[in-house]
């Protein structure tokens, strides 16, 4: 499937499964899911890899901005569960794995259970609360690509590939999944526990 489809389906799947109960978890989890949903395709070629890394940096910047601007509590939770040294170690390991994966054939290492486990472990070192969101989105990417004709090396380094061969990556199914993912993300965000709590606080300040 195409990148936008993985982006929205990844976030939607992660939010649906995890049901975040705080604003910090919602923001960090959605950001991690967005990266997890796309990062596998860093092996699609230099231009695609550059786009994905740029998107990952932009998503990280948005999460940091949201925390600084609206004080959602991500930094405080990060410092309570981690440290700067741990953060840098996890980030460096994440970058090294992605750099290696970007040089591998498409749908090989970066589309395997091993890469999902390794990158999720890095995310757990960086920000433990976000790791499950990342893993779910990553798994959704593998599941969606299994629908296509080209095989995935899920059990890398074994050469054997797996594919259900049900549809192309750019056809009608992709567009339907993209639309469904966008709708689900919006619904999940506005009906989430943090959003409902925020709405209740706003209503409590109204003069009627």
Image (cartoon, helix red, strand yellow):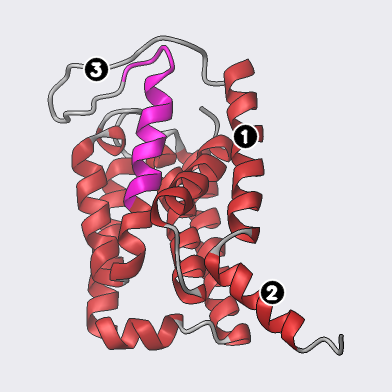
Q: Is residue 90 above or below residue 68?
A: above
Check disc 2 and report the residue beneath it.
199
Percent of width and height locating residue 107: 33, 28
Marks 1/3: CA distance?
A: 28 Å
Provide the residue span drawn in magenta: 135-151
- Figure quadrant of the C terminus: bottom right
Residue in the image at 56% along x and 63% along y: 58
Q: Is residue 172 above or below residue 186?
A: above
Check disc 1 and report the residue beneath it.
180
Residue 143 lies left or right of residue 174; in this view the side is left
Foreground pick, 182 / 16: 16
Of the image marks 1 and 3, the number of the one nearer the N terminus: 3
Q: Is residue 51 above or below residue 45?
A: below
Residue in the image at 24% along x and 61% along y: 122
Foreground pick, 205 / 20: 205
Is residue 82 visible from the viewing direction of this image?
no
Residue in the image at 52% along x and 20% along y: 169
**Neighbourhood count class around disc 1 (C-alpha, 10 Å): few under 14, some 14–19, many 20 upward:** some
Percent of width and height locating residue 88: 28, 76
Check disc 3 and report the residue beneath it.
161
Residue in the image at 31% along x and 60% along y: 131
Is residue 162 visible from the viewing direction of this image?
yes
Of the image marks 2 and 1, the number of the one nearer the N terminus: 1
Marks 2/1: CA distance?
A: 25 Å
Residue 84 lies left or right of residue 167; in this view the side is left
Is the stretch drawn in magenta largely helix, strand or loop? helix
Q: Secondary structure at mark 2?
A: helix
């Amino acid at each position: 499937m195409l990148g936008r489809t993985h982006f929205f389906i990844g976030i939607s799947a992660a939010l649906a499964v995890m049901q975040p109960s705080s604003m910090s978890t919602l923001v960090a989890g959605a950001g991690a899911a967005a990266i997890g949903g796309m990062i596998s395709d860093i092996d699609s070629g230099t231009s695609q890899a550059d786009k994905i890394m740029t998107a990952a940096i932009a998503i990280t910047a948005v999460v940091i901005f949201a925390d600084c601007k609206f004080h959602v509590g991500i930094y405080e939770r990060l410092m309570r569960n981690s440290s700067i040294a741990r953060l840098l170690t996890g980030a460096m390991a994440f970058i090294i794995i992605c750099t290696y994966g970007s040089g591998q054939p498409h749908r090989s290492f970066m589309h395997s259970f091993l890469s999902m486990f390794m990158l999720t472990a890095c995310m757990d070192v960086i920000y433990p609360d976000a790791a499950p969101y990342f893993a779910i989105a990553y798994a959704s990417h593998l599941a969606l690509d299994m629908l296509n004709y080209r095989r995935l090396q899920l059990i890398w380094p074994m050469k054997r590939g797996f594919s259900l061969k049900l549809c192309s990556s750019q056809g009608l199914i992709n567009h339907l999944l993209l639309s469904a993912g966008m709708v689900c993300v919006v619904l999940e965000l506005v009906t989430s526990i943090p959003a409902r709590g925020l709405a209740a606080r706003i209503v409590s300040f109204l003069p009627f």
